[in-house]
Amino acid sequence: FRGWSLGYSMDSKTKTFFFSLSVERSNQANTLSYQCDPNLCAVGQWLHLAAIYDGKTTFLFINGELRTSKSVCKDTSCGKITYPIPSDDGWSGATPFMIGAYNNVKTGNVQSHVGSMKVLRICKVSLTQSDIKKLFYKFSSLRQSPIDVNFYWTSSIESDIPSPSTRHSPSTSREKISVLGRLKLSSKYACRFSYKDTSVRSSYAAPHSTNRYICSIPFWPAGFKGAAMSLWACDDDLCQQSESVRPLWQRMCLRKSCGYVSTANSSAYRTNGVKTVFTFTTPTNIYKFENSSANSRLLKVATLEESLAMSSARHFVSSTGQDYLLVANYGNGRFTSVHSRLYGLRLNAVSRSLELNTLQNISSRAAYEWSTCNFKNDTFMALASFMDDVRVYKLVES
C-alpha cells in the first residue's frame, strides 16, 4: 500500500470509516478506523467527514467533532506521505487520484461510492479542530434535508429514452417533458429551473407512473440561459407550504431494484449525478426596413435557429454577387465553445420572403463580431472573440 485513502465499508448493521496512509517512517498501510453510531450515520443523512495527518498523528472528524486518532509511527516525526514508485510490485504508471471510488490497481477491483458528495476539499496543511468546525457549520443546513434514497429521478443523455426527454426549449414554450426515476404515486412533483436569482417551476402534479413524471415547461423570464433543472417533491396536501417541499435526489442507477425494467438495450442507460442543464432559447429575427412616403416600418422576413445566442450579424456580398450572412454566436446558454455560422441568402421571387441556407458551422469561443473585406477577387472574413484569437477565413464559392 502506498499513498492515502479515505473511505468507508458497510453492511446491514455497521458503517465503518477508515483513513489509511503510508509515510516515510512507516511505509505500509497505517489505518485509522471508526465504527459510526447508527443514529449519526443513518442512510440518506448528510455527513461532514474530515481526515487529518499532521506529520505524526492521524485524526478523523465527523460533523466537526473528533471521533478517533492514532499515532502513525513511534518517532517524533513520521515524515511525508509516500506514493507508489515503478519498483513496487505490480505497479507502473502515474498514481491515480480517484474521487467517489476506490480503485485497487493490483486486483482491478473498483468499489464505487453509492450516494452524493456536496464538497471535496484537499488542504496542503493540517487543519485545527476550530477550522474543521467552521467548515462543518458552513454546510450544516444540509443535515436538515436528508436524502430519501428510495425515491429519485435520473439524468440520462445516451439512453433510447432520454431523461429529461429534451434539454432545450424556447423560453415561451409550454411543451411537456418527461423524466425517468423511481417515484412515489402518493406524492406530487414539479420541474424546477434556476439560474442565479431566477427560478421558476411547473405546477405540482402526481407522477404518470412509478417510473415517469411529465411536467409542462413554465415561462422562462430570463432570456437565453442554461438553467439548472431539478425535480422537487411534496406530500399531497402540503405542496403550498414551502417548508414541506424538497428537492428529489438525482442519482445513478442501472439496476432493476431502482425501478428500471430490463430491455434488450438496457446497457445503453448511462445516468449521471452532475447538474442537469436545461437551455432556454430565444428567437433571432431578421427584419427588412421598408421606407415609403407614407410611413417607414420594419418587416420580419426570417427567423434564425433558436440555438443561437447572437453577439452580432453581418451581411456582405461576395465578388460574384452572392449574398451572405455571418452570425457571431457567443454561446449556447451553457458553454461559449460553440459554432458561429455562415448563411447563404436568397430572396424568393414568388413570395418575396428571405430564404436562409446554413452553409457552414464555424468553431468559435464567445464570438463577438465578424468583419469582411474584398482583396482582388477574393473575399476574406475575420472573427473577433472575447475568449479567442482573431481568426481570418477565405470564402471559397462553388
Image (cartoon, grey):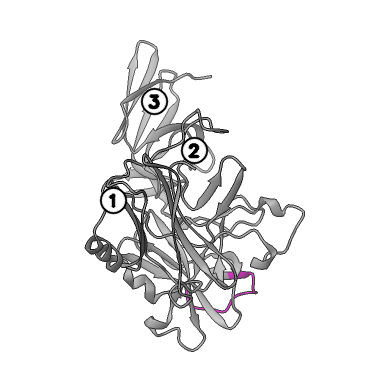
Earlier in the chain: of badge 3 and badge 1, it is 1
Which portion, as a residue range, is magenta? 202-213
The residue lying at 53 percent from left, 30 percent from top is: 92
Asked if the stretch drawn in magenta spans residue 145, the answer is no
Q: Quadrant of residue 381?
A: top left
Amino acid, disc 2: Leu
Tell which of 112 and 127 is nearer to you.
127
Residue sitting farthest toward the top: 376
Residue sitting farthest toward the front: 74
Q: Label 1, on which residue?
A: 54
Earlier in the chain: of badge 2 and badge 1, it is 1
The residue mark sitting in front, 2 or 1, is 1
Question: Disc 3 on helix, strand or loop?
Answer: strand
Tell which of 113 and 194 is nearer to you.
113
Numbered-mark total: 3
Q: Label 2, on which residue?
A: 356
The residue lying at 31 percent from left, 26 percent from top is: 390
Residue sitting farthest toward the right: 264
Tell which of 138 and 333 is nearer to you.
138
Q: Which mark is residue 382?
A: none
Q: Name above or below for residue 312 compared with residue 224.
A: above
Question: Disc 1 on helix, strand or loop?
Answer: loop
Q: Label 3, on which residue?
A: 317
For disc 2, the neighbor class at 10 Å (few under 14, some 14 to 19, many from 20) is some
Amino acid, disc 1: Asp
What percent of the width, then of the height, locates residue 330?
Answer: 35, 41
Earlier in the chain: of badge 2 and badge 3, it is 3
Asked if the stretch drawn in magenta spans residue 208, the answer is yes
Q: Main secondary structure of the magenta part?
A: loop
What percent of the width, then of the height, locates residue 243?
Answer: 38, 82
Q: Name above or below for residue 337 compared with residue 264.
A: above
